[in-house]
Amino acid sequence: KQEVTQIPAALSVPEGENLVLNCSFTDSAIYNLQWFRQDPGKGLTSLLLIQSSQREQTSGRLNASLDKSSGRSTLYIAASQPGDSATYLCAVVGSNYQLIWGAGTKLIIKP
Amino acid sequence: EPEVTQTPSHQVTQMGQEVILRCVPISNHLYFYWYRQILGQKVEFLVSFYNNEISEKSEIFDDQFSVERPDGSNFTLKIRSTKLEDSAMYFCASKADIAGSYGELFFGEGSRLTVL
């Protein structure tokens, strides 16, 4: 059964720092991996989608990598800003075509 | 930019009442989903819907739940007799049909259901 884990559960850094969020999954047979952002009490905003055949995707200050064989993905945020404060979720699509979610990393960027 | 819209944003109901949550997926998408997130817990898959029928459902999606696409635009989730443990944020999502790859899911803002 696929399990998705995100470490750390929470992270607080000063504004301007580059940071890395981690996601690991137990079954490497995935179709893709998606990173989402969730603001408190709000919906799920898709940030990046990496297909299983891809190694990374970039959007603005965000870069997501995927190492399927080791069951890991990272989300790199460059030059962090207070507006980046949110919970970041990763989710994988496996053989059952369902998104399996991690618990998220709550990120706080201090001005 | 096209988006998934959900109504209501928040509903409070008494235990045992029926609830219908509504979603308008992105217009050219063919796959539709409901997920839920109980406060403080992971997002969980409920059901997927394609070609006017359920394609997958989880253990959570028991006989108390049903989905329907009553017209060309709406996608609804009905909970027949709500329980306290149904209190959660319910997310609708849709996905285009992209040959050769499993596409990106786009989510709505969610409907918060509070069962008293």
Image: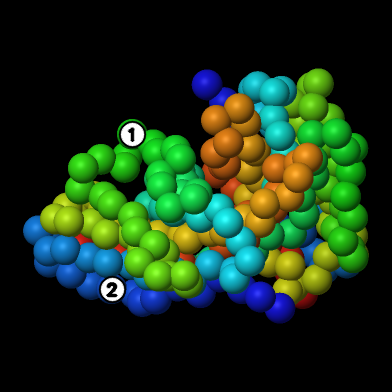
Residue A102 in sight from this viewpoint: no
Mark 2 and mark 1 residues within 8 Å of each other at the beta carbon: no
Q: Amino acid at mark 1?
A: Glu
**A74 horizontally vs B57: left or right:** right
x and y percentages locating residue A60 in the rendered image: 90, 65
Circles 2 and 1 on the same chain: yes
What chain letter is assigned to the residue under label 1?
A: B
Rendered view: A46 above or below A27: below
Measured from the top left, where is residue B76 in percent x and y? Answer: 36, 64
Q: Residue at x 80, y 44 (%)?
A: A50
Residue type at the position of mark 2: Gln
In this view, the residue in front, A24 or A55, is A55
Name the quadrant of the C terminus of chain B.
bottom left
Residue A107 location, x and y as percent?
67, 58
How many marks the image carries: the answer is 2
Q: Is residue B54 positioned above or below B69 on the image?
A: above
Crowdedness near tag 1: few (<14), some (14–19) or many (≥20) residues, C-alpha within 10 Å: few
Q: Which residue is mark 1?
A: B59
Q: Chain of mark 2?
A: B
Residue B64 shown left or right of residue A30 in the figure = left
Tag 1's secondary structure? loop
Name which residue lies at 65% across and 22% down.
A27
The residue sitting at 83% across, 47% down in the picture is A64
Residue occupied by mark 2: B11
Q: Position of residue A101 (x, y in %)?
A: 56, 42
- Colouring scheme applied when the structure was drawn: rainbow
The kind of secondary structure element at disc 2 is: strand
Snapshot quadrant of residue A12:
bottom right
